[in-house]
Image (cartoon, grey):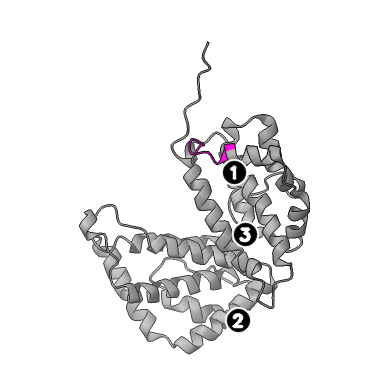
Amino acid sequence: MAVRRRSAPSSLEEHPNLAEILGVLAQLPHVTDAELPALAAGWHNTVYLADARSRALDADSPLVLEVLAAFEAVQALFADDLAGEEHYISVDPQVTTVALKAVRDAIAGAYARPILSRGEYLALMRAWRSVYPVSAVDEPDLGPNAAQVKSVLATLPLLATRCHDAAAAELFSTLKERAGRFDDRVREAARDETWQAACLTSRRRLWMLVRRSGAQGIGRICLTCPPAGRVRQDPDAEQQVLALCLDAACALLVADTVDDNLTDALVLPLRELIPSPRSSS
């Protein structure tokens, strides 16, 4: 008798292993420099592991395109660590390279669990679970101003609809005007200070995640417009508005660790435009 195959999930929300997937993905920006060597030490490639990986990344595996997109996100999130050129990098890039193999195997294993044998699944997750025995979170911890950071990030996909949404177009125009009004040198200095704070408080990967998420949000293709109309409108202004919003989001990310004046220099341009961009002191 033929074995009936479980239908593959068509979206992440339908995935039967959703909780574990979210737990792995949410942990990524919180991986510490001390945990990278531990991940690397726990990863040992074998023929069995390679076969399990191949099965997990097969074209018929659940949501395999999302898995590959997650791999790209991992590469971007740890780009500085892999380059090893910045003064704040403390782990040998070769160690990080091996650690990220453990990370990618865990992502592949979590997504492909419904089609893997128990042994294949455990092999792919082994190095990850040696460092993170349980999933402690289901989304990245954006700190005490998380709601405000999310508010800023949620605005960027709305701006991508400005081609047909009058309210979004008006907000974009206002933000563009604000971007040109504030002193770039002051904003640059404040951005540098808040970036240093992110490095000192082990939030630099969260910082990179916020900036990547924001860029993806405003860069979305508008599906409401006909294909011929799906072109980027005023890309220079878009970059100015994006920088304005990302600077504010990243300042809010570390607002509890820096002087209020630094935060205000980056958040002030968005005040009264985006609701509650900063929690009260």
Mark 2 secondary-structure assignment: helix
Q: Secondary structure at mark 3?
A: helix
Q: Is residue 59 magenta?
A: yes
Residue count near mark 3 (Cα–Cα under 10 Å), binned few <14, some 14–19, many ≥20? many
Q: Quadrant of residue 230?
A: bottom left
- Residue type beneath disc 1: Ala
**Considering only vertical position in the picture, is 183 above or below 59?**
below
**What residue is disc 3 on?**
29
Q: Is residue 85 rendered magenta in the image?
A: no
Secondary element at tag 1:
helix
Which amino acid type is marked by label 3?
Answer: Pro
- Looking at marks 3 and 1 on the same chain, the residue that comes earlier in the sequence is marked by 3
Q: Is residue 19 visible?
A: no
Which residue is under mark 1? 108
Q: Position of residue 21 (x, y in %)?
A: 58, 44
| Closest to the observer, 120 or 34 | 120
> What residue is disc 2 on?
193
Residue 268 percent coordinates (x, y): 46, 78
Q: Main secondary structure of the magenta part?
A: loop
Tags 3 and 1 in contact by the CB under 8 Å rule? Answer: no
Residue placed most toward the observer, 45 or 168? 45
Quadrant of image for the C terminus = bottom right
Q: Residues within 10 Å of mark 2 (few under 14, many from 20)?
A: some
Q: How many marks?
A: 3
Distance from disc 2 to disc 1, alpha carbons, whole Å, reads: 37 Å
